Structure formats: structure tokens, C-alpha cells
Amino acid sequence: MNSPRASSRRYLPTSPFGPPPEGPPVEQYELDDLVTHDRYGLGRVILVESGAVVVDFTAKKMRITAPFARMIKL
């Protein structure tokens, strides 16, 4: 049974179990990067903000927030 507190517990260095795994690194995007999105298709990054990017998908411009699960840099 997992309690809601289990994820907020601190790791003890003397524990026989390893530290919790780190999450995957957040993809870094720059201006004019070509990207593909599962829903919107091919696009170009036109604005980079902290934790989000704005992508021009020709049909519309979308603001996509981190962790960019459905977007891949080409």
C-alpha cells in the first residue's frame, strides 16, 4: 500500500535501498528548432520561455509546457 507521504520521504544514506531514481532531463529547445508533435504535426519554435515554448504549426501557434512529452526535436 502506497501512502501519499511515501514520495516526500527523504532518503537515508544508511538505507540498504538505493536513492529514488531521478526523472528524465527536460528537453532544451532553442529558437528556430524544428519539432514534431503527436497532435499538431511539424512545427518551428518561435519563442522560448522558462518551462514552455511557443511553436508555429502553420495552422496555429501553440504554447506547450514542460515536460514536452509529446514533442520531439528534429
Image: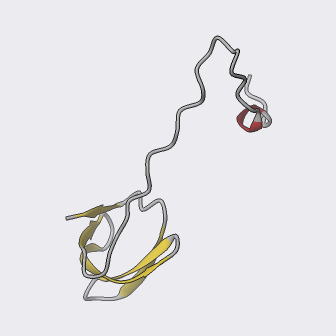
Left or right: residue 34 versus residue 63 is left
**Residue 70, position in %: x, y?**
37, 60
Quadrant that contains the C terminus: bottom left
Left or right: residue 29 versus residue 35 is right
Which residue is the extreme one toward the top? 16
Question: What kind of colouring is applied to the model shown?
Answer: secondary structure
Which residue is the extreme one toward the front? 13
- How many numbered marks are there? 0
Q: Nearer the viewer, residue 51 or 70?
A: 51
User: Can you say whether 16 is above or below 38 in the image?
Assistant: above
Q: Quadrant of residue 17?
A: top right
Q: Name which residue lies at 52% across and 39% down.
A: 22
User: Can you say whether 35 is above or below 27 in the image?
Assistant: below
Q: Quadrant of residue 14?
A: top right
Q: Name which residue lies at 37% across and 64% down.
A: 28
**Residue 72, position in %: x, y?**
28, 61
Q: Nearer the viewer, residue 63 or 11?
A: 11
User: Can you say whether 51 is above or below 60 in the image?
Assistant: above
**Residue 16, position in %: x, y?**
64, 11
Quadrant that contains the N terminus: top right
Left or right: residue 35 versus residue 69 is left
User: Can you say whether 35 is above or below 48 in the image?
Assistant: above
**Residue 60, position in %: x, y?**
34, 88
Q: Name which residue lies at 72% across and 23% down.
A: 12
Q: Name which residue lies at 38% across and 59% down.
A: 27
